[in-house]
Image: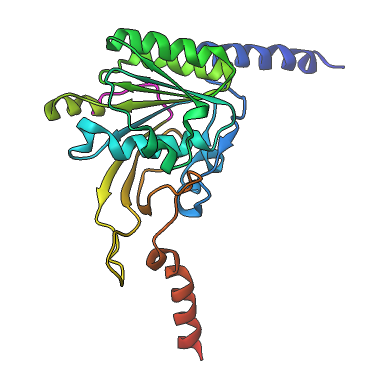
Amino acid sequence: MTAETWKKPGLETLRATISRLEGHSDRRRKTLPFGVREIDSRLPGGGLALGALHEVAGGGNDALHSAAAGQFCAGIAARTRGKVLWIVTRQDVFAPSLKQVGLSARRTIFVEAGSDVDVLASFEEGLRHGGLGAVVAEVARLSMTASRRLQLAAETSGSLGIAIRRWRRQTDAADFGQPTASVTRWRVSVLPSVPLPVPGVGRPRWLLELIRARAGECADFEVEACDGKGRLSLPAALADRPDQEAAGQRRARA
């Protein structure tokens, strides 16, 4: 064996050490697909990374009450395995709305924290526990340092961490543009539901903005809100569009 061959393992070890110190990881994360090709194709690994921190905020007035954002997060958490820890600072979580998107109260452990500091401490402890399917926490301010601690805790345990960014004033929502260590960042805005041919209210619709995706692509999606199993879907008109285009091309060639 030549001297050059002997040097290679040492060099690779050194590179791996430097990469680890810089905070990079070669481990392939497991993912939780949305089951919607248009969304999963924009995410590394074809889905939402497990063992990682994600941020979600509501658009418009939902930035203050987080109704749609909360349901979006509940739909994701419902598709994980194990208990879900849900940390709040206000007693206004409407459990039936979480049940509506598949997250049963039997699976959910609700914790009320007195301040953002307590929320972050509980959030980190929950992520480090390792026996939870997901940890969801309502957070107003999230610094780079705090988000790094949460990201490292999620990486260590493999649990899914979701920070619902919720503010008390609309002007505070500007904080959502500050850099953090989260892997993805989403904004959920309410859209009018599709009119029904009979009196009633159609399935809720959301504008889902993927504002940031590490090693992925930003994109906007118009989706129908999570169903009883936490699954999103595209409105029928959008879902049928590729087939209609293909049919049009076939007609043009005929």
Q: Tell me the colour scheme of the image.
A: rainbow
| Pick the front one: 227 or 150 | 227
Q: Is residue 145 visible?
A: no
Q: Is residue 181 magenta?
A: yes
| Pick the front one: 208 or 100 | 100
Q: From which residue to which does the magenta span run?
A: 177-183
At 30% from the left and 63% from the top, the residue drawn is 194
Q: Is residue 38 left or right of residue 145?
A: right
Q: Position of residue 93 (x, y in %)?
A: 32, 28
Quarter of the image for residue 100 reads: top left
At 19% from the left and 28% from the top, the residue drawn is 173
Q: 83 above or below 116?
A: below
At 46% from the left and 18% from the top, the residue drawn is 151
Q: Is residue 127 magenta?
A: no
Q: 37 above or below 128?
A: below
| Pick the front one: 126 or 171 | 126
Q: What's the magenta bit mostly, secondary-structure-wise?
A: loop
Q: Position of residue 193 (x, y in %)?
A: 28, 58
Q: Is residue 64 left or right of residue 127?
A: left
Q: Is residue 138 left or right of residue 43?
A: left
Q: Is residue 167 visible?
A: yes
Residue at the far right in the pictured view: 1
